[in-house]
Amino acid sequence: MKKIDSFRDKGLRAKMVDRLIDRDIRDVRVLDAMKKVPRHFFLDSAFIEFAYKDNAFPIGCDQTISNPYTVAFQSELLSPKEGDKVLEIGTGSGYQAAILSKIGCRVYSIERHKDLYLTAKKNLLNLNLNVKLFYGDGYLGIPDHSPFDKIIVTAGTPKVPDQLKKQLIIGGILVIPVGIDTQNMMVILKTGLNDYELISEYKNFKFVPFLRKKQ
Ligand code: SAH
């Protein structure tokens, strides 16, 4: 069934973006992309009605689409620019990838659940967004396509995987939620071939776990 982006959807989305601004999101590229991308296209039909509430929602396979604030916050930390080559770990619904793609980033995204990978592919094609999707274990990054300007992880990991840091360019940044029950959002800058600097850290996020291996 063809999905429709109605005036009502657009209105609800503009309000969602106003709430993001009220809550301190400032990056105009991020705000503009979030105003344009129909979040309701990425949700199961049972939740479409709630697409513009500030909540995470189930997307199948026991996973969730992150709440809009978390997507905005992580995107802002990445300071995405047109042409940036970005790797996302944890495609899920494809929504975060869509936001980065709308900004003009060249997005590579990997997901370990086959069903989610397939649905995300459909969701992104539906919007004519050219995101390169991969099915597999993102713990290892995507070495064949590295290096990346930026890497974003959308699942909580107890430890920062070395392979991900290695796949950054020097000057590149990694945004990653680190922790077991709750996570701290870390922004790590690669300053030399084997040198990294934690440039900022924000407490108290709640992500689904970053797991190893495929299903
Ligand atoms: N960015 C997503 C949010 C998805 S939740 C969105 O916008 O909808 C996190 C996702 O990470 C889940 O889909 C989960 O299956 C995936 N994931 C967890 N561990 C992974 C791994 N090792 N490799 C790839 N994907 C992983």
Image: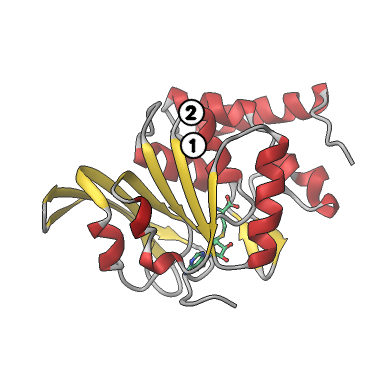
**Number of marks drawn:** 2
Q: Quote the CA–CA distance across marks 1 and 2.
A: 5 Å
Q: Residues within 10 Å of mark 2 (few under 14, many from 20)?
A: many
- What amino acid is labelled 2 in the image? Ile
What percent of the width, then of the height, locates residue 27? 41, 27
Identity of the residue furthest to the right in this view: 1
Identity of the residue drawn at 61% across and 48% down? 94
Q: Is residue 201 above or below residue 23?
A: below
Identity of the residue drawn at 28% across and 48% down? 147
Q: Residues within 10 Å of mark 1 (few under 14, many from 20)?
A: many
For the residue labelled by badge 1, is the local secondary structure a helix, a strand or a loop? Answer: helix
Q: Are marks 1 and 2 in contact (CB under 8 Å)?
A: yes
Depth check, front residue: 51 or 3: 3
Q: Quadrant of residue 7?
A: top right
Depth check, front residue: 141 or 198: 141
Identity of the residue drawn at 77% across and 45% down? 50
Name the mark on residue 100: 1
Q: Is residue 113 left or right of residue 110?
A: right
Q: Quadrant of the C terminus?
A: bottom right
What percent of the width, then of the height, locates residue 196? 15, 55
For the residue labelled by badge 2, is the local secondary structure a helix, a strand or a loop? Answer: helix
Q: Is residue 165 above or below residue 42?
A: below
Name the mark on residue 103: 2
